[in-house]
């Protein structure tokens, strides 16, 4: 999380630094209208560049995946940037409209122009009215789409469709920004930054519109087997790949798109890689799509697999590791245990697996994987034993402070453990966590 916060702050600081290098500082100490004349473009530039970087991250640029800690971190930063873009867009609208309303109400003196003062050059003059009108309507649409994206009760399949409208909406807002940016900015550092970021984001938006995102990481296959565990509503799916898979590490995930499905969903891979062309996924019925999947999936069904993604890869500096899984968060640990068993290596690992919906068949599979990998398993039925907290962790694994902790599970569970562990002496860089959320 620290890395994401620093990245967000760095993007913000870069924009403001380029902007400050492009204006006359004297204007910052000017009257109300002078300051407003600076804030209107600044809020607009912040909004459009935040949105542009969010669009770039949505294109899944694997080149920077390691630097940001994995694709799951991409989506958290993507969300922050999207929210920040909306906030800046609202401020931009208020700074633009508010003073005009105050003047009309007689609460503010109108701006007085100095006689004989030269008017500001107006590039793209013939497009300014169009850009202004399109920008205002696009702003209103942005508010609606952002609200739907943040509303967790809005069905995922509808969210997926509405969120794809962000790409063409960005192109409209980019047109608005380019046409209405002050002429003086184009010969200044901020103009160069705007051109570079918006051009790159326009390419990413085009990839989204034409469904080209992730195309070079897509592989085809078919469903070979599946089994639904009634006790915990987890669907195990086996996939035989018909095109060459590059291999994956335990803990990585992929986007699956089944035949007759209009969208791909991300699922953690629950199998190690033995170069046999087979992948396994354990899918929890949490949403509208995954709950219906056991009734519609069939053997032989075509599937597209896009990946692998993620950096939840169990690399650590210490010899001992503590794995903590909640519910379907056990999936990356199953994959890692299978990889350990296949390689014949041994690690000093304790695995705490808690669930409120135990299924005997599924738990026996986890026990078998742990036994084959030499992992010490501590199983917790939270319905009988209560939720896992640091006191219980310390009881089962007294040396937990000397381990690298890997967590995958519900966000509140992860937050609680993280705060308790850091407060009790664990170094922040030894707590590893998957943050993947599509919304």
Image: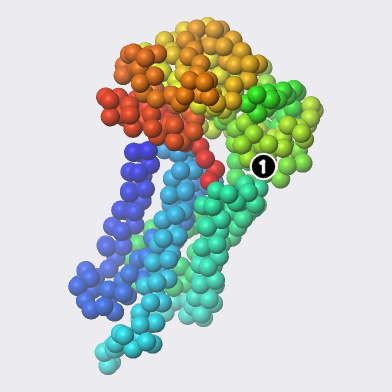
Above or below: residue 242 compared with residue 349: below
**Residue 418 position in % (x across, y down):** 36, 30
Of all residues, the one furthest to the bottom in this rendering is 115
Name the residue furthest front: 384
Q: Residue at x 44, y 32 (%)?
A: 413
Q: Residue at x 72, y 23 (%)?
A: 227
Q: Nearer the viewer, residue 210 or 374?
A: 374
Q: In the image, residue 155 lies at what x, y percent?
A: 63, 49
**Which picture quadrant has residue 92?**
bottom left
Can you see residue 196? Answer: no
Q: How many marks?
A: 1
Quarter occupied by the N terminus: top left
Instruction: Give the side of residue 265 with respect to residue 171, left or right.
Output: right
Q: Is residue 147 above or below residue 2?
A: below
Where 41 sits versus 366, above or below?
Answer: below
Q: Residue at x 66, y 48 (%)?
A: 157
Classify 10 Å Cα crowding around label 1: few (below 14), some (14-19), many (20 and above): few
| Residue nearest the observer in this picture, 357 or 182 | 357
Left or right: where does residue 279 sit relative to residue 399?
right
Q: Position of residue 110 (x, y in %)?
A: 32, 87
Q: Percent x, y for residue 384?
A: 52, 21
Please report the residue visible at 37 percent of the width from the left and 14 percent of the height from the top. 395
- The relative height of residue 141 versus residue 235 in the rendered view (above or below) is below
SS at circle 1: helix
In this orientation, which residue lies closer to the viewer: 341 or 405? Answer: 405
Q: How is the image coloured?
A: rainbow
State left or right for residue 43 relative to residue 367: left
Residue pointed to by mark 1:
288
């Amino acid at each position: 999380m620290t890395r994401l916060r620093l990245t967000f702050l760095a993007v913000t600081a870069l924009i403001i630094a380029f902007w400050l290098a492009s204006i006359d500082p004297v204007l910052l100490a000017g009257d109300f209208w002078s300051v407003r004349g600076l804030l209107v473009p600044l809020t607009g530039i912040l909004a459009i560049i935040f949105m542009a970087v969010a669009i770039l991250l949505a294109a899944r640029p694997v080149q920077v995946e390691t630097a940001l800690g994995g694709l799951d971190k991409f989506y958290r930063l993507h969300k922050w940037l999207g929210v920040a873009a909306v906030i800046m867009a609202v401020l931009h609208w208020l700074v633009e409209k508010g003073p005009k309303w105050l003047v009309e109400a007689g609460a503010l003196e109108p701006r007085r122009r100095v006689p004989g003062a030269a008017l500001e050059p107006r590039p793209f003059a013939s497009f300014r009215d169009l850009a202004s009108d399109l920008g205002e309507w696009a702003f209103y649409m942005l508010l609606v789409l952002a609200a739907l994206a943040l509303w967790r009760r809005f069905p995922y399949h509808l969210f997926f469709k509405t969120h794809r409208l962000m790409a063409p909406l960005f192109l409209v807002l980019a047109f608005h920004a380019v046409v209405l940016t002050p002429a003086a900015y184009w010969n200044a550092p901020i103009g160069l930054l705007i051109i570079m970021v918006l051009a790159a984001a326009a390419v990413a938006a085009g990839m989204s519109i034409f469904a080209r995102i992730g195309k070079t990481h897509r592989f085809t296959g078919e469903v070979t087997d599946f089994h639904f565990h009634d006790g915990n509503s987890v669907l195990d799916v086996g996939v035989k790949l018909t095109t060459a898979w590059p291999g994956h590490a335990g803990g990585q995930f992929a986007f699956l798109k089944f035949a007759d499905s209009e969208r791909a969903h991300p699922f953690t891979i629950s199998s190690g890689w033995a170069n046999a062309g087979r992948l396994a996924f354990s899918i929890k019925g949490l949403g509208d799509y995954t709950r219906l999947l056991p009734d519609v999936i069939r053997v032989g069904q075509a599937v597209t697999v896009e990946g692998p993604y993620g950096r939840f890869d169990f690399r650590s500096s210490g010899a001992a590791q503590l794995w903590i899984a909640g519910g379907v968060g056990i999936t990356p640990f199953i994959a890692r245990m299978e990889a350990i068993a296949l390689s014949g290596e041994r690690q000093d690992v304790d695995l705490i697996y808690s669930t409120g919906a135990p299924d005997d068949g599924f738990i026996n599979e986890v026990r078998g994987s742990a036994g084959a990998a030499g992992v010490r398993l501590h199983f917790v039925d939270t319905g009988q034993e209560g939720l896992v907290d640091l006191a219980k962790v310390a009881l089962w694994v007294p040396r937990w402070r000397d381990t690298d902790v890997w967590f995958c599970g519900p966000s509140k569970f992860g937050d609680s453990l993280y705060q308790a562990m850091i407060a009790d002496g664990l170094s922040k860089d030894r707590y590893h966590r998957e943050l993947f959320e599509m919304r």
